[in-house]
Image: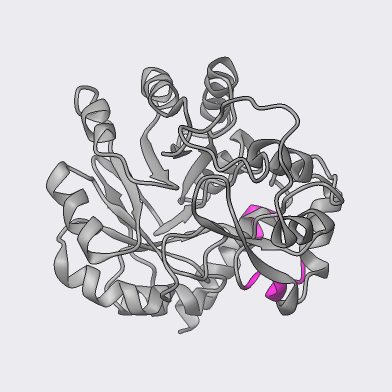
């Protein structure tokens, strides 16, 4: 089956693949541009970035591609509105927002006509998103990495949500192959969002030791922890995540990075440590099926393989 295009607002991606925005700093300009150059939609993970850093990453991505570049931002971030406005001012193509739900973001995007794409996990939020003016929605199931809004499989979520809204639906969680993409499209999705496969890519900004850690993970290494954001989060078992599951690891320094924080640990610092290669005290977010990935590959090869697999189906 030939993969269809994916239209969001006035932008049309040649292939219906959105690269997940993985924070902190796993998906930066280099990864996002590489995906955009292959016809997909590349996302810069804006959570944890300063405004000048975000402007730099967007400018760098623009210098590397003329494809579609967006950002992903946590609604739970204390600087949520500031990051969104900075991205809009820098000319970002679209904004994907998760780890919470914001009604205000639709007003922020309206004046500039910047497409807003919320991440949802229920029919109710899908309908609300459409009513508020979402250009598309990412429907994320329990298989996804990072913060989770549901314990239901994406394969159960897509059909009822597709029947409930008319805007484009992008399936997220557990999508690793061309066969998975076709399955999501046949269920009614217009595209897919993929995180894990691109986290384990050459262009991913993860430290080499973190990428190798992904490849060594086994199914029973994938765990769910309670995030300071107030949501469960899917991660790889590390000494740090083990400590978090056993009890609180209160931060010694608080950067007030979240609107509301449970203070059981500092998520921004823990994710940053992992991104830099500290796997003893770092938090490694991952999708449920990361253990199925056996190679670190360039984005170009990843996407060409996905397209070939999809066409074979």
Residue 295: say if magenta: yes
The number of numbered badges drawn on the structure is 0
Q: Is 89 drawn above or below residue 180 in the view shown?
A: above
- Left or right: 88 in relation to 67: left
* Res 226 quadrant in image: bottom right
Give percent across and percent down for residue 52.
57, 15
Q: Is residue 205 visible?
A: no
* Relative side of 304 to 99, left or right: right
Q: Quadrant of the C terminus?
A: bottom left
- Residue furthest to the bottom: 313
Left or right? Give the position of 243 relative to 95: right
From the top left corner, tell me how far across and down residue 47 is, in percent.
54, 34
Which is more toward the observer, 160 or 29?
160
Which image quarter: residue 305? bottom right
Q: Is 88 situated above or below 198?
A: above
Choose between 248 and 41: the one closer to the eye.
248
The quarter of the picture where the N terminus appears is: bottom left
Q: Could you tell me which residue is drawn at 43 percent across and 76 percent down?
A: 153
Q: Is residue 85 above or below residue 217?
A: above
Q: Is residue 250 visible?
A: yes
Residue drawn 16% across the image and 72% down it: 163
Q: Which percent across, then down, holds residue 209?
A: 86, 51
Q: How is the image coloured?
A: one colour
Q: Residue at x 77, y 66 (%)?
A: 295
Q: Position of residue 68 (x, y in %)?
A: 42, 40
* Residue 237 vertical position relative to residue 211 in the rendered view, above or below: below
Specify start and end residues of the magenta stretch as a single range: 289-301
Q: Is residue 39 magenta?
A: no
């Amino acid at each position: 089956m030939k993969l269809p295009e994916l239209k969001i607002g006035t932008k049309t991606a040649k292939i219906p693949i959105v690269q997940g925005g993985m924070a902190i700093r796993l998906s930066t300009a280099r990864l996002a541009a590489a995906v955009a150059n292959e016809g997909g939609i590349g996302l810069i993970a804006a959570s944890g970035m300063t405004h000048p850093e975000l402007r730099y990453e967007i400018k760098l991505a623009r210098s590397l591609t003329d494809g579609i570049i967006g950002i992903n931002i946590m609604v739970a971030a204390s600087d949520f509105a500031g990051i969104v406005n900075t991205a809009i001012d820098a000319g970002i193509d679209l904004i994907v927002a998760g780890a919470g739900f914001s009604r205000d973001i639709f007003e922020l995007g309206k004046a500039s006509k910047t497409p807003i794409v919320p991440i949802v996990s229920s029919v109710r939020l899908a309908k609300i998103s459409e009513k508020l003016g979402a250009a598309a929605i990412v429907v994320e199931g329990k298989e996804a990495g990072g913060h989770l809004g549901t314990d239901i499989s994406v394969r159960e979520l897509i059909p009822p949500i597709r029947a409930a809204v008319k805007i484009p639906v992008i399936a997220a969680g557990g999508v690793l192959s061309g066969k998975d993409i076709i399955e999501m499209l046949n269920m009614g999705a217009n595209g897919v969002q993929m995180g894990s496969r691109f986290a384990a890519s050459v262009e991913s900004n993860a430290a080499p030791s973190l990428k190798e850690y992904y490849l060594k993970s086994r199914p029973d290494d994938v765990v769910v922890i309670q995030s300071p954001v107030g949501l469960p989060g899917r991660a790889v078992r590390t000494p740090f995540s083990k400590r978090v599951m056993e009890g609180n690891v209160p931060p010694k320094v608080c950067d007030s990075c979240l609107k509301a924080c449970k203070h059981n640990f500092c998520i921004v610092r823990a994710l940053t440590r992992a991104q830099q290669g500290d796997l003893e005290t770092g938090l490694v977010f991952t999708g449920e099926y990361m253990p199925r990935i056996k190679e670190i590959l360039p984005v170009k090869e990843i996407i060409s393989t996905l397209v070939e697999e999809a066409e074979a189906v």
